[in-house]
Image (tube, rainbow, N blue to C red):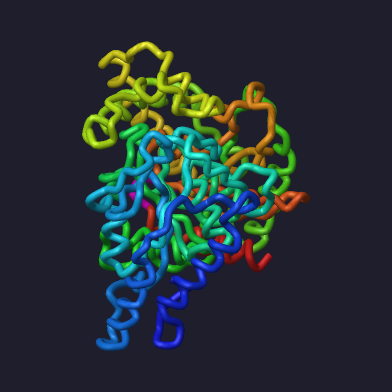
Amino acid sequence: MRVLVSQERTSLSLVDECLRRIAELDSGRDGLGAVLALNPQARAQAEAADEQLERTGRQRGPLHGIPVLIKDVFETEGIPTTFGCAAFQGYVPRQDAVAVRRLRAAGAIVLGKTSTPDLAMSWLSDSSNGSNTVNSRSAAHEPGGSSAGSAVAVASGLAPAGLGSDTGGSVRVPASFNGVVGLRPTTGLVSPDGMSSLVTAQDTPGPLAGCVDDAAVLLQVLAGHQRPVDGARRPLGSYRLGVLALPAEPVVWDGADEVAAVVDAALARLAGEGARILDDVVVPDLPALMRDSSLYLTTARDDIDAFLASRPELGSSSFLDLYYAEVFPESLDLAELLATRSQSSVQLRAERLANRRRLQDAVVREMRSLRLDALVYPTVRVPAPLRDRNRESLPSRLLPVNTLIASQADLPALTLPAGTTDAGLPVGLELLGRPGTDGPLLGLGRAVEGALRDG
């Protein structure tokens, strides 16, 4: 980790600094609105970590004494967990989600919980729990979702690292909008047990961090690996990157030209540092493959129902219970789509799942034929939109994200800060790898990060 605990820099001092910044920047009407609940035992646990280090000279693990903020879709023992939904306020889990348990086992101090839309159902931040999270660079703009609070917290120095979850881009969209590093691991690499479900076949925990090195340490811990997962160090000039040709979007949002200019400038810097860049890489039939492998309207309601049924103490037996109780905010447009869709057939579910493999095969085939280490493209085609936009003409579900490609193809993807617009809003560059290449992808990310930072 970039931040380390030692005899001189104690865990307690780090926790106190984070708590001070949360009190100063996050609270009140004009605060960031990123943190929902704090761990009342955080300072005592930090003191215990310091005592252990002083007494034994040994750290518990690679995150010894490091404060981490946890997205509120993960169950945390002894700390309220709402899954972003006002209906579940007061729920205090009896045990941690697997990802949280692994963070604690590696020595991390769980500092608290961060904001998210209800059941992680949006790429923006709207939530029934009233968190009103804002972008770390501009209170007038969206922070992105659904890992809104964790991304804002890392970007604002409320904690050195954050845990998010990613279904269709919920780690990478807010990472892009707030100028931090976000990783979607290969689906299945990190256990989602103890995390609320949206689309079970796509859901995965993922780290948010200030740099690639920190994201690599977090992935090592989350995946349960004993050794670093970031692969061999290679110079940028040894990589071949393909710029993915993207289909047109049906809705026009402001700022697309600005994002394209920032990404083009970043790619020019990478080429100037020796990276081999191939333009206009086409994945055949990509729009049709994306359409036919989408699971949101096919499985999400059933997957949410299965999660709720597994936790009767929440008091809601189905998604429709919550919807007809008018729990969800009106701006959460995916909720209305899920409530009004007809029940999916078993055959349709099976077809959509099979099409995910076809999508992956098409992407990987093109990468192999061109000998590419990664595909690259803007994480989101626009900068963070205004919070007071016209939500009828620009609904959150139509935000022009490119993150769905990795999610539906079960591929690892890493977003890095590529630069900012003239208004100072961050722009993310996404790197898409082949199946199971999370380590090499992080190695590439480190090389790209160095070139963009130095440029």
Establish if 299 lies above or below 96: above
The answer to which image quadrant residue 140 occupies is top right
In the shown orientation, is residue 277 left or right of residue 410? right
The answer to which image quadrant residue 227 occupies is bottom left
Observer-nearest of 196 and 206: 196
Q: Which residues are magenta?
A: 433-437
Dominant SS in magenta: loop
- Whole-percent x and y of residue 130? 52, 40
In the shown orientation, is residue 37 left or right of residue 52? right
In the shown orientation, is residue 448 left or right of residue 326? right
Q: How many marks?
A: 0
Establish if 248 lies above or below 341: below
Residue visible at 28% across and 82% down? 52
Observer-nearest of 61 and 418: 61
Residue visible at 70% across and 53% down? 420
- Whole-percent x and y of residue 221? 32, 62
The answer to which image quadrant residue 327 occupies is top left
Instruction: Check the picture and name the quadrant holding the C terminus.
Output: bottom right
